[in-house]
Each structure stands twice: as C-alpha cells, then as structure tokens.
Image (cartoon, rainbow, N blue to C red):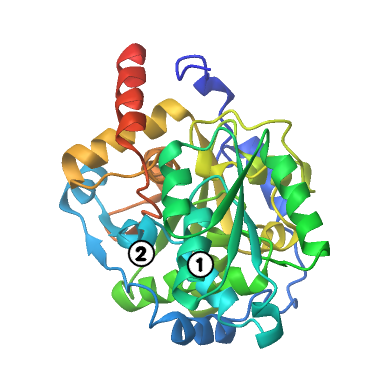
Amino acid sequence: MTLAAQKTDSRLNFNNRAKKAIFQKAIHIDANAGEIIKVDEIKRAAARIAPYIKRTPTVHDNALSERFASNFYLKLELLQNTGAFKVRGAFNKMLTLSDEEKTRGIVAVSGGNHAKAVAYAAKKLGQKALILMPEVTPENYVSETKNYGAEVELFPTMAEAFKRAREYESEGRVYIHPFDDETVIAGQGTIGLEILEDVPQVTDVIVSIGGGGLAGGVAAAIKSLKPNVKIWGVETKGAESMAKALEAGHIVELEKITSIARTLGAPAVAPITFDLARKYLSGVTVVSDEEAVEELFYILDRVKVLTEPATSCTLAAAKRLSANFTAKSHVVLILCGGNIGLNDLFELQALEKQTI
C-alpha cells in the first residue's frame, strides 16, 4: 500500500464535537479509583534502571516554538541505548526477576524496538533471549537484535508471534510483553519523571501509542504529580488500536496493520493500557502516514535528528492540536525512537515525492 492510497479523510480525531462525546463516554471512570500504576513504583523503577540506561535530555526547540507560537520541547529519547525508550521497561522487568526465573530463558515479541531492548538488556544482564518477530520486520531490526546475542524466530503475522510467545511461556520461558505488564509500563513511565524534572512548567505532552505502555506509563507518572498536564496520545491510520478501542468502549483487535509506522503495530491494546488511556489521556489523534512522513523530514531538516514515522507522528498530531496551545503553553513532544534504516529512509523519501 502506497502512502498516497491512505486517505486523510479517514483520520480519527477526538477534538471535534461529535467524537469528543464518544471519547468522554469512553474515559468515564470511578473518581475514587486509585492509581493503576503507582508513581512510587515508577520512582523505584527509575532508581533500579539508572545504572543501565541513559538519562536523556529534554531540550527547548526554537524552530517548533516559532512554528506554533508557543514553547515547544523535545524529549530526545531516541538518544537512548538501542535508539528507543524500550530499554527502560526491559531492564526494569529483568532486574525484578527471581534467581529461578533468570534460569528459564526469556521470550519476547516485537516488530523492532522492544526486540532490540530485550536483547540488549539480556546481554548486559547475562540472560538468554528468544525474540519472535513478524516477517515484515525491517532487516536492520532483525540484524541488530541478533547482534545483541538474541535468537530470532520470524512469523507471518504479529498475531501468530504473540500466540507462539504464550506457548513458550507455558513451556517455562519468562515472557516479557512489550506493554501488557505493569513492571514494563513502570519502566517506561520513568520518562515522565524526567520530563517533570527538566520542564516543571510543562502543560502538554504528546506521545505515540503502539500498545500503550509508553503513553500509559508517562501519563501515570506525570498526572500523579501534576494532574493539570494534558497528555495527548497519537496513532497512525492503519495502526489505531487504541483509538478504535476508545471509540468502541472496549478493546478492539485490528484485522491487520497497514501503517508504515511498524513499531506502532500492536494488533490490540491491553486491558491495563486501555484503562490508563481512559483514565489519563486528554485525547487520541490519528494521523495519516503521509503526515508522519512529512514531519519526519521536517524534523530532520529543521531539528537535525532522524526519527521513525512512529515518532514523527507526534509532530503531525501537534499540528492538528495547535488550537490547544498558546504562548503560555509548554509542550513536550516525546521523540521515542530513531531506529530507521537508510534503505527505509530513501524509500520514504521517494514515497513522499509521489504525494507532492
């Protein structure tokens, strides 16, 4: 499927009046409900993983601030070990395993960044990892995962990979789910603590949603400490499992992933990430692949960093959400990953030219 074939008129945005009503219905939750992921657990995760990860910077960006007539910041998580945020959750999970669990071997499912994170963490901690990946996974992800010492098995679809992972788990391996795990989510939530340290005046955070672990963890951290901050989730058309779930009021499984943002390709969100989204998100914006690619090259040209479409979609969402930002706003975009091969980059450039 070409980028041009993906129509922007099918985009889903909860900011218009009709769908806002749907979203507000979806996020109804008991006001007395406690924290789903406790901020103290996120703080403990931060201390636990500190020796193994990079403390990435959050920087003010002049180009974006001028573009939106506001104050824009970039959380440069793409500078993280393995090039993405996923190592936070992987390390937090592995560092909490018992001695007996460490002897079983680890299995994980991923279309890219989680694979590299688990493989890297396993290597650093002296554990064995088996990674299950869909056959459409870009070669750079497969080769880098293997280079970290993990064994890789490929499957026709992500759904089949997830099914096989559960079978491996029943056979004794420790399954590290990319997002359906409180310990993993707490690890990802450490990004939220760092944002509050770097930009204490933050008013808005824009974050990508795949399975929802990053968005849920960050939201849990920030909203627990500064409830007035708005957390805006972002997905791409063809990988909008959270948006569809919120619209329906229950978890929905996508028949297939058609977006080029492969690292957002979770067939369905998890109950815990769904609940976190309903409790904390101010909205979910679904952008087209075309928009994500356009902003990828804008970021490369003006900000001088190379992102994935799964990351640049946050800037596409900021454009859609711009009416929410003023000169007094302090908006943080989480640049969660930059793992894109040169061949893929050149292909995206060619596709972008076709749509001009």
- Left or right placement of residue 250 versus residue 92 in this view: right
In what element is the residue under mark 2? helix
Quadrant including the C terminus: top left
- Left or right placement of residue 274 versus residue 14 in this view: right
Residue 194, position as x, y percentages in the image: 37, 75
**What residue sits 54% from the left and 80% below the top?**
42
Q: Amino acid at mark 1?
A: Val
Q: Is residue 297 above or below residue 72?
A: above
Q: Amino acid at mark 2?
A: Asn
**What residue sits 56% from the left and 87% below the top?**
40
Q: Is residue 239 above or below residue 99?
A: above
Q: Nearer the viewer, mark 2 or mark 1?
A: 2
In what element is the residue under mark 1? helix
Of residue 11 and residue 70, the one placed in the foreground of this image is 11
Mark yes or no: residue 7 visible: yes
Residue 247, position as x, y percentages in the image: 72, 42
Quadrant housing residue 179: bottom right
Q: Are marks 2 and 1 in contact (CB under 8 Å)?
A: no
Specify few, some or many for label 2: CA neighbours under 10 Å numbering under 14, 14-19, or 20 or more. many
**What residue sits 38% from the left and 83% below the top?**
51
Residue 84, position as x, y percentages in the image: 40, 57
**What residue sits 44% from the left and 37% below the top?**
139
Q: Which residue is mark 2?
A: 81
The number of numbered badges drawn on the structure is 2
- Left or right placement of residue 97 versus residue 196 in this view: right
Specify few, some or many for label 1: CA neighbours under 10 Å numbering under 14, 14-19, or 20 or more. many
Quadrant housing residue 327: bottom left
Which numbered marker is on residue 218? Answer: 1
Question: Which one is earlier in the sequence, the residue at label 2 or at label 1?
Answer: 2
